[in-house]
Image: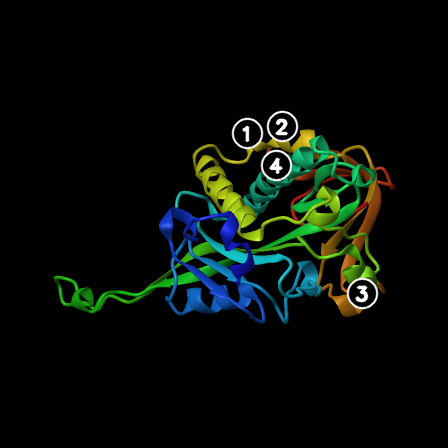
Amino acid sequence: MFSPERNFVDWQLCGFGNSPAFIFESLESTHSLMKQRAAAGEIAGGALIVADRQTAGRGRHERTWASPAGQNLYFNILISLDGIPLASAPQITQVAALTFAEVFKSLQDESNAQGLGNKSLGKVTVKWPNDILCGKHKFCGILAEVVYVKKLMPKQVRHDVSGQVRHDVSVPAVSMGVGINVNSSPLDYAHLGRAVTTLKDICGRSINREKLLQMLIGNLERAVGQFRAFGIRPWVAAWKRMDQFIGARGTIIVNNRCTDANRDSGEGATKKTGSILDMQDDGSLLFKCDDGSVETVYSADLEI
């Protein structure tokens, strides 16, 4: 998959804690395969699935995520919820978005210092709940879902000391899918009708995908470890420093079966327009609607 880039980096790709990585030339969706393998007990927390191409990649609200081959990064990491309350699972994507944005910002700053960067796009920024943009142009999306990982009981311990049968159990984990426009062209996404860019366009140079993936996974593993210990609160101040949209006008879209087919008509979704007031200590969004009401939003899309 990364053979043209291997000369630049010498390392063994793996997930968290030396968990295995599974690399494919083409998949329908890294998320779908992760969910399938987790349910079958074929994979454990920390595992990583990477595809060079996705034929059925998807984003939030079942939107299609364009996934051409040989240019970008599409991967899924299975994050154990051991030590993390199930209610806090959505916050993991916010931690991931901020962690990844800091990596992208370092690449942008390096390119700008070399006179290569495309400064007209603006700065790398985060947008609640977990989008990463340059200015108002999106180039990285994160989609997470709680899945249940089957833990198969070894045959030799199928029966306890009283003779009772021990059954397999399933434990929750977060299946986090990530799509990053790395070396493709913004023109590849013109048909989407949305503001989209790529890391190559931001930095003015090609980016080594293998090295980038190593940085992202390594930084994310450390970040998740800190999240297990301290929760989301320590991340909020850093988020606010990178979020250029606090104070801006926006529309929150609450998903009620909202899909590509009905999104433009508004069918299946509740939309409210107003102003973004703040991100709170628990990662929720404080939003003032045009009718004067103030809402605390825990899960929604945010359009600027």
If you read the primary sequence from the N terminus, does the residue marked by circle 2 or circle 4 appear first?
4
Of residue 85 and residue 41, the one placed in the foreground of this image is 41
Mark 3 residue type: Glu
Residue 248 lies in what quarter of the image?
top right
> From mark 2 to mark 4, how far is it between C-alphas?
14 Å
If you read the primary sequence from the N terminus, does the residue marked by circle 1 or circle 3 appear first?
1
Q: Which residue is mark 2?
A: 237
Total number of numbered discs in the rendering: 4
Q: How is the image coloured?
A: rainbow
Mark 1 residue type: Pro
Mark 2 residue type: Ala
Q: Position of residue 277 (x, y in %)?
A: 76, 33
If you read the primary sequence from the N terminus, does the residue marked by circle 4 or circle 3 appear first?
4
> From mark 2 to mark 3, how far is it between C-alphas?
36 Å
The structure residue drawn at horizontal position 57% and vertical position 39%, both measured from the top left corner, is: 99
Within 10 Å of the Cα at label 1, are there few (<14), some (14-19), or many (20+) other Cα atoms? few
